[in-house]
Image (cartoon, coloured by chain):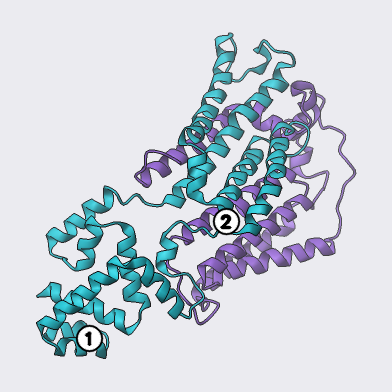
């Protein structure tokens, strides 16, 4: 009791402590209900919460708002942006630009589509094989052009030896278009999707949570996050943080039960 | 080798009003980026800073650098930072700006003063006697021979893809390695 009073932040904790263990059990059940009824609770709290910012639950999920304005705009703009990226890439020999800039612009088209139609939907539409093929295939194409000239008896990337008309010009264009543009666009798309997914809590988080449980840091949040999905965990945190006094009472009650 | 190519007339001009306003814009956005309390605001202002830098590069006749700055810094980096921020909790701040850390500001001021002292030694913009122009072995050679050697008009691309192609290959591999490193750090096996 005394150590809990030391850690209790406000008066509600003391109110909870004055009740007996039965009430603590009730409180714990309430906390479980908080965790399981996440969607309803989330919307209810979002209504009660006057802050303009998104709650933590909404931020944990893939940030996507379906907007007719954004979708229509992206539908109109993206073909032009993609064409501009192609132009920058293909016309790099005669005007400012090149594979790096054009590849970045073409990757930005995918970013736009993802923001308009949802990152997960875009990820499914653009298969992993396509992203990997762009990044790795670009590197192989660059290396292949360089090694081909070596196979023909020259130095690395000695374009004059390529058996094509205007070998230096088209060899450079090949490196820029097939190599650099593909690498840059592929890697940028990959980084985008990776960041959208975030840290994979599948195995790594399970290991750390398991260790925390064995070490005795056995609050209920730890147990739940070890075996339940992230969403339930996030909902519980939102309940503790966003609900104010009631949520704090619930959270401390559960901690109290765990410490006994 | 034909030596230094016939260079355009020296363009040692006064700072125009547009350049001056771009300078002010870049400095203000940089300071706001450093001092903004809200990370979201800092990221957005940083994107504006990159856009100002891109415009400034265009004014100083570096369109390739300007394009890279606009596409990578202003566009892609801002998007990736925003995506990362979307996964964090945003804290409400009562005040808009951090309080200035005066010792750090003093160090920055000393460094800034030192850099300002060097500026008179730098050749003026467009000065034909600047070493970067008057060097016949490097810059002059590229300007004089790029089209004859490679058949492309953009000397920057000729340097990147032909004269220094092996360096560029190394950079391309570095970009691929960065993507793979991100996969490893995030414990994932697929990009998408």
Residue at position x 83%, y 44% in the image: B128
Residue on which disc 2 sits? B78
Q: Position of residue A105 (x, y in %)?
A: 64, 43
Q: Residue at x 65, y 41 (%)?
A: A101
Q: Nearer the viewer, mark 1 or mark 2?
A: 1
Classify 10 Å Cα crowding around label 2: few (below 14), some (14-19), many (20 and above). Answer: many
Chain A shade in the render: cyan
Q: Nearer the viewer, residue B117 or A84?
A: A84
Q: Nearer the viewer, residue B160 or A136?
A: A136
**Residue B164 visible, this angle:** no
Give the residue number, with chain letter if any, for mark 1.
A13
Task: For label 1, count other residues whose C-alpha is less than 10 Å away and answer few (under 14), some (14-19) or many (20+).
Answer: many
Snapshot quadrant of residue B91? bottom left
- The chain ID associated with circle 2 is B
Q: Is residue B187 left or right of residue A20?
A: right
Query: Which sits in the foreground, A85 or B131?
Result: A85
């Amino acid at each position: 009791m005394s150590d809990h009073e030391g850690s209790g932040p406000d008066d509600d904790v003391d109110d909870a402590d004055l009740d007996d263990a039965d009430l603590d059990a009730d409180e714990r059940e309430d906390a479980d209900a908080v965790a399981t009824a996440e969607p309803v609770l989330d919307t209810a709290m979002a209504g009660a919460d006057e802050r303009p910012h998104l709650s933590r639950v909404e931020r944990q999920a893939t940030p996507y708002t379906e907007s007719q304005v954004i979708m229509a705009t992206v539908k109109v703009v993206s073909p032009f942006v993609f064409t501009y990226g192609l132009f920058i890439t293909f016309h790099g020999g005669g005007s400012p630009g090149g594979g790096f800039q054009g590849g970045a612009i073409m990757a930005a088209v995918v970013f736009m589509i993802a923001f308009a139609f949802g990152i997960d939907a875009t990820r499914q539409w653009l298969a992993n094989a396509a992203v990997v093929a762009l990044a790795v295939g670009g590197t192989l194409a660059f290396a292949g052009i360089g090694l081909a000239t070596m196979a023909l008896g020259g130095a690395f990337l000695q374009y004059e030896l390529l058996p094509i008309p205007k070998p230096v010009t088209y060899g450079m264009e090949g490196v820029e278009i097939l190599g650099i543009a593909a690498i840059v666009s592929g890697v940028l798309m990959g980084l985008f999707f990776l960041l959208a997914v975030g840290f994979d809590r599948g195995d790594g988080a399970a290991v750390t949570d398991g260790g925390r449980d064995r070490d005795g840091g056995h609050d209920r949040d730890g147990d739940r996050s070890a075996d339940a999905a992230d969403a339930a965990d996030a909902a519980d945190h939102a309940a503790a943080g966003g609900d104010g006094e009631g949520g704090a009472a619930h959270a401390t009650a559960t901690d109290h039960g765990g410490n006994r | 080798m034909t030596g230094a190519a016939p260079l355009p007339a020296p363009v040692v001009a006064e700072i125009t009003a547009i350049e001056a306003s771009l300078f002010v814009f870049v400095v203000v956005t940089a300071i706001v980026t450093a001092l903004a309390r809200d990370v979201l605001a800092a990221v957005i202002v940083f994107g504006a800073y990159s856009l100002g830098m891109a415009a400034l590069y265009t004014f100083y006749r570096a369109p390739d650098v300007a394009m890279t700055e606009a596409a990578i810094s202003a566009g892609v980096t801002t998007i990736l930072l925003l995506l990362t921020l979307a996964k964090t909790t945003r804290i409400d701040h009562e005040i808009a700006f951090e309080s200035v850390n005066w010792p750090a500001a003093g160090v920055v001021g000393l460094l800034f003063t030192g850099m300002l002292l060097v500026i008179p030694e730098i050749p003026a913009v467009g000065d034909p006697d600047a070493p970067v122009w008057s060097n016949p072995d490097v810059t002059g050679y590229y300007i004089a021979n790029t089209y004859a050697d490679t058949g492309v008009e953009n000397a920057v691309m000729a340097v990147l893809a032909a004269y220094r192609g092996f360096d560029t290959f190394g950079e391309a591999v570095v970009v691929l390695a960065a993507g793979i490193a991100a996969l490893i750090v995030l414990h994932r096996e697929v990009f998408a």
